[in-house]
Image (tube, coloured by chain):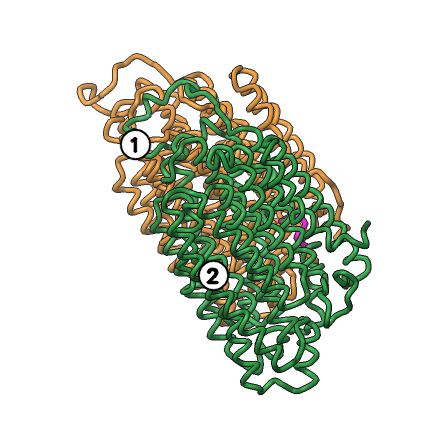
Amino acid sequence: MTEQAPVLILLFPFLSAIVVALAGIRMKGLCWPLVLLSLAGSVCASLSTLGRVLDEGTIRYHLGGWAPPIGIEFRIDGLNALVAVTVSLVALITAIYSKISVEAESKDKVSQYYAIFLLLIAGLLGMVITGDAFNLYVLLEVSALTSYALIAMGSKRATLAAFKYLIMGTIGASFYLLGVGYLYIKTGSLNMFDIHEQLVLNNLEQSPTILVAFMLITVAVWIKMAFFPLHAWLPNAYAFAPTTSSSIMGPLVTKVMIYVMIRMVLTVFGPDYAFEVLNWDNIVVWLAVIAILAGSIGALAQKDLRKMLTFLIIAEVGYMVGGVWLADETGMVGSIFHIISDAFMTLCVFLFAGIVFTKTGRRNITAVEGMFKKMPLTMVGFIVGAFSLIGIPPTAGFFSKWYLIQGGINSGNWEYVVALLISSLVNAVLFFRIIEIAYFGAKPADGHDDHHGEDHSKISEAPFTQLVPLLGTAALLVIIGIYNKDIVSIIQDFLLPFNLGAGS
Amino acid sequence: MTSNIISFTPVLVCLVSLLAVLPIVLLGKKPNLREGATFVAGFIKFGLVVSMLPTILAGTKIEYTLWQILPSLSIAFRVDELGMLFALVASSLWIITSLYSVGYMRGLKEHSQTRFYSFFAVSLSATLGVAFSANLFTLYLFYEMLSLATYPLVTHHQDKEARTGGRTYLTYLLTTSIGFVLPAMIFIFLKTDGGLDFVGGGFLSGHIGPTEALVLLLLLTFGFAKAGLMPFHSWLPGAMVAPTPVSALLHAVAVVKVGVFCILRVYSGVFGIDFLADLDLGVIISWIAGFTIVVSSAIALTQDNLKRRLAFSTIGQLSYIILGMALLTPYGATGSMMHIAMHAFGKITLFFCAGAIFEATGKKYISQMVGIGKRMPITMTAFFIGSLSVIGIPLAGGFWSKFYLLLGTVETGQYAMLIILLTSSLLNAAYFFPIAFRAFFCKPEDSLFEDKVEEAHPCAVAALSLTALATMVLFVYPEPFYSLAEAATRQFMNF
């Protein structure tokens, strides 16, 4: 069974998508348990794969027994094993949460919703574990098409937002396909590792075709991850989507694209090519700085809770892009670690936003008014997520900043360090604004006389299926923070052969 | 030097009050039992701290590594003389403050008392965590924890004023800690290849150049904004919207002293006094501190709100502590560390009195307190003793720390600082004595109060009498604070 674990990661959600769609015809009640079951299977498979990677090193799984470069190869090392665990875990947590909100928001389309939801997860997980550049394109489209559908199922404005996303997403995907085409012309291969070998063997470093391919692929993933200024599709798409959709896409889609970028930079083109031959890493770091600041400023301007969070995603994307292009080993560790920690902290705050929306039916941040009294446990979960985004120890977010800032100092990119610190402070403002409203109420009370006496308002927590995922995510954030050493050592082992060194 | 002891006790000291939150919340509906839990935790905490005192006085350190969080970095505890001194002050005053809180909070029938006691306990955990931190990282962890845990206390009233005060509070504290301390810490981490453990004589020497040292020193001095060094002091007067027990323990003792404690720790344990002396960096800090002392004392003179006057006085007194260490001389350092304790007892008495007056009469402004001595004789006598200590006049413990600070200025020949300290003492007298004087000696027709004696809640009166008494005892017998400060100085200066 463990032999087949790599493909099972993908197959569980993929096949159960069909089962769920069929189940919807007669037995609607079965959909949710089926989704949970398949995603739990996926989590187990990815965990066992991670275990095997740690024991045996890189796993090469030939799909259908066809040997590469002809056949499709799943090649799993420390990096994508970690990301796969993250993706499947986030998916499972969101699925648990989704029960109430999916039933409320897409009443007569529950089974369709879940089928598409599972396909999205399958696409994302596939992108993470595949070792084939063209296969990645296919899965990219799978996840993109399902995303459009998942967004369009939201409120009225979601349709237009999904259309905008569709246009941008298609441009991105086309760029990627073109890039892969150029690579294929020059190297005759679609297998990522094979492409790299061919590049080195044939001394293609100076080839303009490869340069164009690199540019196309980089821009393509930047569009897909909403790297400023290619971000315009994201805020509305995620803000108006159904809450489950934004809870799954907010944490995952952008993070998986960061993974793809890292994979392209390190494995396909190689750090020597990406950082040294081209020598544009300083420009990219500056772009990342602008992205971080723009995302933070954008978030400050929002009154809609989920929209504010979407701008935070844009800032966080800046963190990770910058961290990669610092061309410093610690910075790279920070970026990869941030993929994991950011997935969970974004999940945490999006789950909170979802709970607020189900409870109050309001999108504005003032909806959280008085929640410390009414929903103390929910607020605890939210506060942990917020602290992680601000970067307060010992949450996971603190440690990603710890490594990213070290990378910035090591490579002498002080502008990046400053941007990170500013963004942390902006996050503090953003989240304490919410905490303040939840604590004081939207309008300042006149005196404190009316507050005297013990609690009047009743406690009315979020339903169990929503509260448990939120608190679980919050707990994970602390656990990841405390055990960050172990995760980081896996990342460092993965980075060892690339010999990144310190600073550019 | 004897070898160090590995013991779980320092961790336990921090855990006690953290765990106390559980019974406090569960017993929320039964106030007497709930406060009982606070007291039990307080006494256990104090007992544990005292149980370590003989070991520390014998020159042995107590260590415990809780969790290795990065390969070269762990959450670790280490009890030395300086930490012990601070822990003694904080844990003993927590018990007295709890006593006072019972009187104050019940007297005023405050709302959400369960929340109040819970976060108070968490704050104390963080404070003791700072005191016993073995490295800069652990220190930072508890420092942030303290900032956040005190927010619900500062904004306890949940009205407009509390909201503004709370915003200022967090803005100042988080901006400086994330903006200044965090990058400085990571920079040091990189420069020393992962060493952040406090060492008696500092560890930065040889790792960084003079310019870097200056920048780091400024980042770390202003970064710990809890110390109230100007221009990062405005959060403290803003935080006075909190209920008085919070202002008393947190904003005269725990929070602000954590600020100066961190600065002392960084000077002695990270930079090293010798390294600072070699680079001649002490002078810069002493001028910044000196400026803060004079300006804040002058501002205090103009405040009519009693708690605000006390807040500005605190800002000035905190800078005494920083100034003392920045003199980089043995006497200065001893005085500086003793002042942590002496000022704590004096200032907490003053805050207790301010709160007692408010609770009994509803008066906040000094101009409304003419003749109050007739109505509240015990409170105002305690106030007088507290002011003696803060000004530094014999018969109160504050005299000794000022005495050593003055010796320190003479020792280095920084006579400008001597003048600053003396001027400040005069200013202190000028803003404290009139309050006590007019409370007792005013023409009968000017008095705003009737002759009837009517004190605050007995718990509150007991608490303030205890601290006032302690202030006087410390003049006669300034132990164990003197021995601890003196031993710590020997550690830092290597003589």
Return the residue nearer the eye: B254 or A485: A485
Give the number of the disc on residue A169.
Answer: 2
Question: Is B203 drawn above or below residue B426 in the view shown?
Answer: below
Quarter of the image for residue B72 reads: bottom right
Residue B351 appears in the picture as rendered: no
For the point 27% across and 30% down, the residue is B365
* Labels 1 and 2 share a subunit: no
Chain letter of the residue beneath label 2 in the structure image? A
**What shade does chain B have?**
orange
Left or right of A14, for residue B152: left
- Between the residue at mark 1 and the residue at mark 2, the CA separation in whole angstroms equals 72 Å
Chain letter of the residue beneath label 1 in the structure image? B
Return the residue nearer the eye: B339 or A8: A8
In the rendering, at what x and y percent does residue A289 appear? 44, 65
Q: Magenta region's main secondary structure?
A: helix
Residue B343 appears in the picture as rendered: yes
